[in-house]
Image (tube, coloured by chain):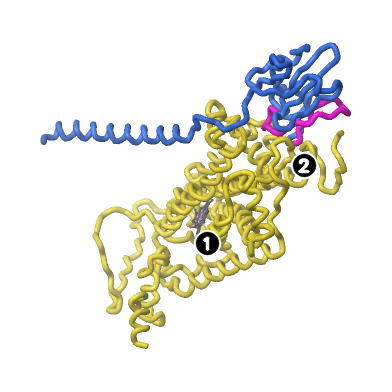
Amino acid sequence: MNRRKFLSWGTAGMVALCSGVVVSLGAVIRFLVPDVFYEPPQSFKIGNPADFPYGPPTFLADEKIYVFRERDKGFSVASAVCTHLGCTVKFFTSDNRFHCPCHGSVFNENGSVEHGPAPRALNWFEVTETRDGQLRVDKNKTVPPNYRLMV
Amino acid sequence: MNLIREIWQSIVRRDPLSTDKGKSELVFHNVWLHIHPAKVKKENMRFKHTFYLGFITFFLFLILVTTGIALMFYYRPYPPQSYQDMKDLQFVVFLGPFLRSMHRWAAHGMVICVFLHMCRVFYTGSYKKPRQFNWVVGIMLLLLTLGLSFTGYLLPWDQLAYWAITVGTNIGSYAPIVGGKLRELLLGGHTVGEAALIRFYVLHVAILPSLVILLTIVHFWRVRKDGGLSKPVWKLKPRAPEQLVTIGATPQVAPMQTIPASKDKTYGLMEVVTGKPNFEIITPEEEEDAVFSYPYAFFREAITLMVTVTSVMAISLFFHAPLEEMANPAKTPNPAKAPWYFLGLQELVSHSALLGGVVAPALMVIALLAIPYFDRNPSRRPSDRKWAIGLFTAFVVVNLVLIIIGTFFRGPGWAFVPPWVHVVAGPE
Ligand code: HEM
Ligand code: FES
């Protein structure tokens, strides 16, 4: 084997080795990304319209949403997840505002930030009526805060 | 009797410890002890030079490994069983509360000691040439220590755990571009749930401790290869005043000192190569100052170990690690606080998640890593390094003040509440 041959085989070998390492690392990282999430569905039924009172919003703990029902206007659904770092906000009827316990963000009843470090308004989710007359919320679809569902 | 002696000698294979040869063989015939030199400089072992903080940190880590393995016998990384198991450890397992408390307090202690150890190394200028890289290894160990605390924090699956990790991982998602993906990778999902718990568990009991062990080995090896511990600052000679020289005069050179070969010393040389060594060289007078590691250094280390273990045990007898209600994703406790050493970070985050949670900590870590390469002042004497000491002290003070504000001055809704004011209820 001459010098030239040795160097080209050597280089090819090194390239093969390095790409092998890179590909394996990539595969390991890909392995860690789950393909199936055993998480609650993002779109779900929340019950009959009649279950929800007028006035202060109803908090659904498992879904982390607030369901508003206004006379003559209809239904709207706000996310209870603070846009700052994900704590669950609480609605206070005393001042009609959402307060976040973690870093003190305050959102008004339209979900806009009034105070604190939250960078964005609270999300509002699409709410529709299913064929059997129930309400369905889809967390994948955000809507403007003036969105209402009349039933 | 002879058989017992023979067995013993087959294990230890060294001369009696009353002889110098025995004392050195004790060190270099033993795989665990031979990370020490056979002889140490007496002055370097002084308490007021290192405060033994590196050793204390290491011993706390050993306590964490042993108590952690004990806890693993009862802990299942699966909600809600995890929380049940913590309750069991707290109430029905013999010695459960004690071991759990030891693990918890040793973890807090390790965070404190690793930080103080870093301060000691900084103030004594011990990161300077040739020890620059060991400082970098040290910073890695500091980050791993924080990572261990963070991952361990989720395992009890109580309210504190759930919300601290929810907030903590959301901070990460503010990192530009990769943030959201990184969080998903760490949690194995979109929220803190089953998948997150098992991932944190694997990191906490396997990956991070292995990395700490690996780097600790490098760290200790490096201390040794850099010429042992740095010289205490009070032993450093002031810089020689500049001398006036007459051009053309013959320079005065001290004659080379020759050390007579002694008949009762033997030397083994592996190889003779040219080039300068890159560790600190000691003078013959300093060599005279050295004492055998046995018993001088080992005795001190053993005392440090015993004091560390008994302190953690004593604290664990009287104070039990807390356990809150089971994690409840629907109800955020108010105020929701991270572990105390992350409260400085949480305080920053309460002002801006991107600047306070990503940019500021990233800059801090980079600055810490860069210190030995950035600080080009060769002198280790405090009087020569006023600027460096001032800046570092400012760094320490800012961190402490942020932690104190986050811990004692933040009430419900993260409102500023001095500790002497008692809040009865938030707005309702
Ligand atoms: C798991 C964490 C750590 C452990 C177990 C550890 C352990 C030790 C030990 C046992 C020593 C011997 C002297 C002493 O007790 O002070 C030492 C020295 C040293 N450590 Fe660490 N250390 C850790 C983290 C760090 C950190 C965070 C830094 C700094 C960023 C650091 C930088 C150094 C340096 C530069 C030395 C040499 C000091 C000298 O020669 O005076 N170490 N370490
Ligand atoms: S998570 Fe709501 S203010 Fe930080």
Query: Which region shows up in magenta?
Result: A82-101
The crowd level at tag 1 (other Cα within 10 Å; few <14, some 14-19, many 20+) is: some
Q: What's the chain of the residue with tag 1?
A: B
Task: Please tell me if label 1 and label 2 are on a single chain.
Answer: yes
Give the residue pinned by disc 2: B410
Task: Give the quarter of the image for residue B157.
Answer: top right
Quadrant of the frame with the C terminus of chain A: top right
Question: Is B227 left or right of A20, judged from the image as shown?
Answer: right
Q: Secondary structure at mark 2?
A: loop
Residue lying at 53% horizontally and 39% vertically, measured from the top left: B366
In the figure, the blue chain has which letter?
A
Seen in the picture, residue B183 relative to B368 is either above or below; the reply is above
Q: Position of residue B91 (x, y in %)?
A: 69, 59
Quadrant of the frame with the N terminus of chain A: top left
Drawn colour of chain B?
yellow
Residue lying at 37% horizontally and 79% vertically, measured from the top left: B8
Q: Tell me which numbered mark, 1 or 2, is placed earlier along the sequence.
A: 1
Question: Is A20 left or right of B228, judged from the image as shown?
Answer: left
Give the residue pinned by disc 1: B232
Indicate yes or no: mark 1 CB to ligand 1 under 8 Å.
no
Judge depth for marks 1 and 2 and give the one in front. 2
Q: What's the chain of the residue with tag 2?
A: B
